[in-house]
Amino acid sequence: MATNKEDIYAALYARLSGSVTGLTTISRRLKSFESTDPSEQPAMFVHQSSVESVSTTGMPSKQTVRAEVYVYVYKDADEGPMPTLNGIVHQIETALERKAADPLAHAKGNTTLGKAVASARLTGIEYGGGLGDGAQGVAIISVELVVPS
């Protein structure tokens, strides 16, 4: 039976939006940092990226859903955006850790987002700091969500 991908993306969004503090904007509608006014930042956008299916003869397909979390921080101060950006990224990393209420995921330490997925894990972070006038920071966090069989 096919898993509703919207349920997965909604569970990821709910986990992150309920766990990450200090944000002015939180949305699933992706905007570029150039289109996000400094007054709307810090901002977090949860973007659905792709779905991959792997088939094995005689077995149901295994699907992996990918999402990207974009974080924008504009700081026109001497320290720049990176200290605030690093704090928000740390909150996202913590939100994706296994919670006491999560059943044990197939990979130790990974969350199941309340049973929405078999496993959710962070797979990489790309940073851009000092963009534009030096006050714009960007992080793009890749998340892999394994669909339950």
Image (cartoon, grey):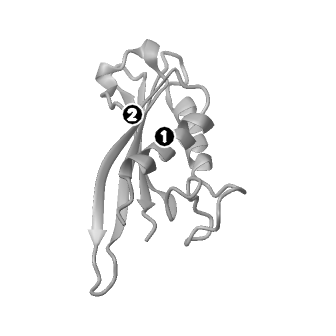
Residue 5 is situated, as x and y percent measured from the top left of the image, at 37, 52
Label 1 Cα neighbours within 10 Å, binned few <14 / some 14-19 / many ≥20: many
Residue at 46% in and 21% down: 41
Residue 116 is situated, as x and y percent measured from the top left of the image, at 51, 56
Residue corresponding to mark 1: 13
Q: Is residue 82 above or below residue 12?
A: above
Residue 25 is situated, as x and y percent measured from the top left of the image, at 47, 23
Q: The residue tagged with tag 2: helix, strand or loop?
A: loop
Q: Amino acid at mark 1?
A: Tyr
Q: How many marks?
A: 2
Foreground residue among 30 and 82:
30
Q: Is residue 89 in view? A: no
Foreground residue among 20 and 130:
20
Residue 140 is situated, as x and y percent measured from the top left of the image, at 39, 42
Q: Amino acid at mark 2?
A: Arg
The answer to the question of whether label 1 and label 2 lie on touching residues, with beta carbons closer than 8 A, is: yes
- Quadrant of the frame with the C terminus: bottom left
**Disc marking residue 28:** 2
Residue at 35% in and 66% down: 63
Q: The residue tagged with tag 1: helix, strand or loop?
A: helix
Foreground residue among 58 and 65:
58
Q: CA distance from mark 1 to mark 2?
A: 8 Å
Toward the top, the furthest residue is 39
**Disc 1 or 2, which lies upstream in sequence?**
1
Q: Quadrant of residue 64?
A: bottom left
- Quadrant of the frame with the N terminus: bottom left
